[in-house]
Amino acid sequence: MSSPSPAPGAAGRSAFLADTALIFGRYARQTLRSRLQMLFGVLMPLLYLLFFGPLLTGLPLSSAGSSWQVLVPGLLLQLALFGGSFGGFGLILEKQAGILERMRVTPVSRAALLLGRVLRDAALLLFQSVLLVLAALVMGLRAPLAGILVGFAFVAVLAVSLASLSYALAMKVRMPQEFGPVVNAVTMPAMLLSGLMLPMALAPGWLDALSHLMPLRYLVDAVRAAYTGAYASPVVLRGALVAAGFAALAMSLCTRAFRRAAA
């Protein structure tokens, strides 16, 4: 008696996972061949850590935790902010070279073409985040292991969200010269209004109120709370909900952009 064939839905999921792994592997190998990309992506947060961190040592930046527990979470999310937001540059170059067009005529799932890239970006930023935290521990950071792991989880989700939006934008523009100004116009206000460098509680009341319109603000507050050991606090829960909602919205917008481009 022949064995029953797999259900169509199971076969489709298996093919999708295989396609995603294939695309992830392609871009992961590409990244591993460029060690400068892996190391220089963490250079700016590391410079902040080395030259800005010692200035904050001993300052009462927060009622809970040390200055390192305030600075390092902000630097982690800054890494995800800029690393994820500029990921679309590579896609624009692939469009111009005709690589993306050739990939789209293959039987690979359109969603896998997106997800493989996004997972590569998240993996790279997690690697850079580990390097940053190790350097911070040497310089004086003291945080519970669970809090550090929670911080990595937020970095991964934010990287997926911003890389997805970056790829969606890259599908809309024609040249890198159009892409860069748009990304800068979004990332700079996000960095300044989310309290990445210093808690927004130190800001004037109007600026603190304005910062609550920035989703990144809630992720920053959540990671800082986790670094002080407050894993089950409402701040962490609120940050997790905002991060999950933002990721779902970003993935949906990017998937739609890929499908429209392929139509």
Image: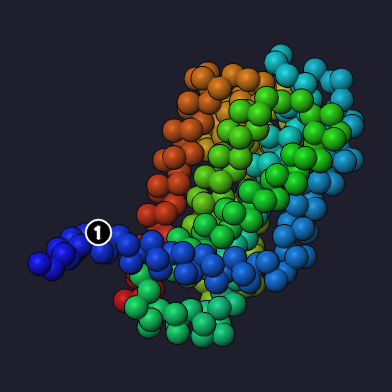
- What SS does tag 1 mark? helix
> Does residue 222 lie above or below 3 as drawn?
above
Residue 220 visible here? no
Residue at coordinates 38% horizontally, 61% vertically from top-left? 17
| Count of labels in the image | 1
Quadrant of residue 57 within the rendered picture:
top right
> Does residue 224 lie above or below 134 as drawn?
above
Image coords of residue 81 (percent x, y)? 63, 49
Image coords of residue 187 (percent x, y)? 63, 50
Image coords of residue 100 (percent x, y)? 48, 79
Residue at coordinates 33% horizontally, 66% vertically from top-left? 15
How did the renderer colour the structure? rainbow
Nearer to the camera, 64 or 187: 64
> Does residue 101 lie above or below 124 as drawn?
below
Residue at coordinates 44% horizontally, 52% vertically from top-left? 250
Nearer to the camera, 189 or 108: 108
Image coords of residue 83 (percent x, y)? 65, 55
Label 1: how many residues lie within 10 Å, few (<14), some (14-19) or many (20+)?
A: few
Nearer to the camera, 61 or 113: 113
> Does residue 246 lie above or below 231 as drawn?
below
The residue indicated by pointer 1 is 10
The quadrant of the image that shows the C terminus is: bottom left
Quadrant of residue 106 within the rendered picture:
bottom left
